[in-house]
């Protein structure tokens, strides 16, 4: 199906309005069932460009659906990517506001701090490690604009992969000092353990997941830039939280990162 230019813009406006009004909306494939994966990335690109026109800046990339379990759940064989904007980075010391979300969930991730531009279509995990100055513990807060967090792959890609906020912890470690393939993590809510996992869940190695994203971006002439942050994908399932909750992710060797939510 060829989409009229106007239709893509309409979808962008629909998703941005949902985000601004903190309102969940019907998924777009209900109205446009023939939308393709490629069109979904075009819509995502337009949505990001619109945010840039409103004064926001791209500061990195995020991956989604990096675990086999999540891919099987969605019936797909590939991860997805979206972009991180400067207003998504939340400091660890300041509570996030529940009223700024629709129905937020938290997930533990490993952040890569990129020190050199990298672009290509045959980039390896080793190449990624060479341009990564530090890895750090992180929590991503996802907040799908869709009703009950229910969507197809096309819907979630257009919605910038449910991106909302993220928090990076203050222990930054050179990737050379770690076995990135097996970093244990648990996430707690109000001091009770809610999820546990290993970084192995992220395509066997989070650096391989980042390489996948760079190769995917390379297909459209894009890449990572010096100074970019990459969220390599959720290590465990995402956990819902409310006002009054404190979420902490504790990583082996990487320390912890946490945030509280106020009303
Ligand atoms: C899609 C985004 C998933 C991750 O790390 O897997 C994601 C979603 O589940 O809403 O950010
Ligand atoms: Mg995530």
Image (spheres, rainbow, N blue to C red):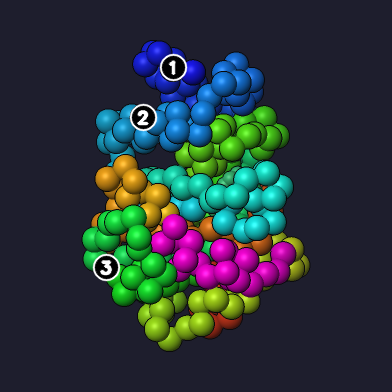
Q: CA distance from mark 3 to mark 2?
A: 27 Å
Rounded to the nearest angstrom, the CA distance separating label 2 from label 1 is: 14 Å
Circle on res. 46: 2
Residue drawn at x 51%, y 47% is 80
Q: Which is in the foreground here, disc 1 or disc 3?
A: 1
| Residue that numbered label 1 is attached to | 3
Quadrant where the C terminus is found in the figure: top right
Q: Secondary structure at mark 3?
A: loop
Frontmost residue, 28 versus 14: 28
Q: What range of the chain is rendered magenta?
A: 195-212
> What residue is shown with label 3?
115
Q: Earlier in the sequence, mark 3 or mark 2?
A: 2
The first of marks 1 and 3 along the sequence is 1
Vertical position of residue 203 compared to residue 86: above or below: below
Task: Using the rendered image of the protein, determine whether residue 197 is visible from the camera's viewpoint.
Answer: yes
Q: Residue at x 67, y 69 (%)?
A: 197
Is 251 in the magenta? Answer: no
Q: Is residue 200 left or right of residue 112?
A: right
- Within 10 Å of the Cα at label 1, are there few (<14), some (14-19), or many (20+) other Cα atoms? few
Q: Is residue 206 above or below residue 91?
A: below
Residue drawn 63% across and 76% down? 184
Res 116 → quadrant: bottom left
Q: Can you give x and y, in whole percent of width and height, for residue 227 in the image?
A: 27, 61
Give how far across and how far down residue 106 sits, in percent.
61, 54
Q: Residues within 10 Å of mark 2 (few under 14, many from 20)?
A: some
Does the image show residue 86?
no
Image-quadrant location for residue 260: bottom right
């Amino acid at each position: 199906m060829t989409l009229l230019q106007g239709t893509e813009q309409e979808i962008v406006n629909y998703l941005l309005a949902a985000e601004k009004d903190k309102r969940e909306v019907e998924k777009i494939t209900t109205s446009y069932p023939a939308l393709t994966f490629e069109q979904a990335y075009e819509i995502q690109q337009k949505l990001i460009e619109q945010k840039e026109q409103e004064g926001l800046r791209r500061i990195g990339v995020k991956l989604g659906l990096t675990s086999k379990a999540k891919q099987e759940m969605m019936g797909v064989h590939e991860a997805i990517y979206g972009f991180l904007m400067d207003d998504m980075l939340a400091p660890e010391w300041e509570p996030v506001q529940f009223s700024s979300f629709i129905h937020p969930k938290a997930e533990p991730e490993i952040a890569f701090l990129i020190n050199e531009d990298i672009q290509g279509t045959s980039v390896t995990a080793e190449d990624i490690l060479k341009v990564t100055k530090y890895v750090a513990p992180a929590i991503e807060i996802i907040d799908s604009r869709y009703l009950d967090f229910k969507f197809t792959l096309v819907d979630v890609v257009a919605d910038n992969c449910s991106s909302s906020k993220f928090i990076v912890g203050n222990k930054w470690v050179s990737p050379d000092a770690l076995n990135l393939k097996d970093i244990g993590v648990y996430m707690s809510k109000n001091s009770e353990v809610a999820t546990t996992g290993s970084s192995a869940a992220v395509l066997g190695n989070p650096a391989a997941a980042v390489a996948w994203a760079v190769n995917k971006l390379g297909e459209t002439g894009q890449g990572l830039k010096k100074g970019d942050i990459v969220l390599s994908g959720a290590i465990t399932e995402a956990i819902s939280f409310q006002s009054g909750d404190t979420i902490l992710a504790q990583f082996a060797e990487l320390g912890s990162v946490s945030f509280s939510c106020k009303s």
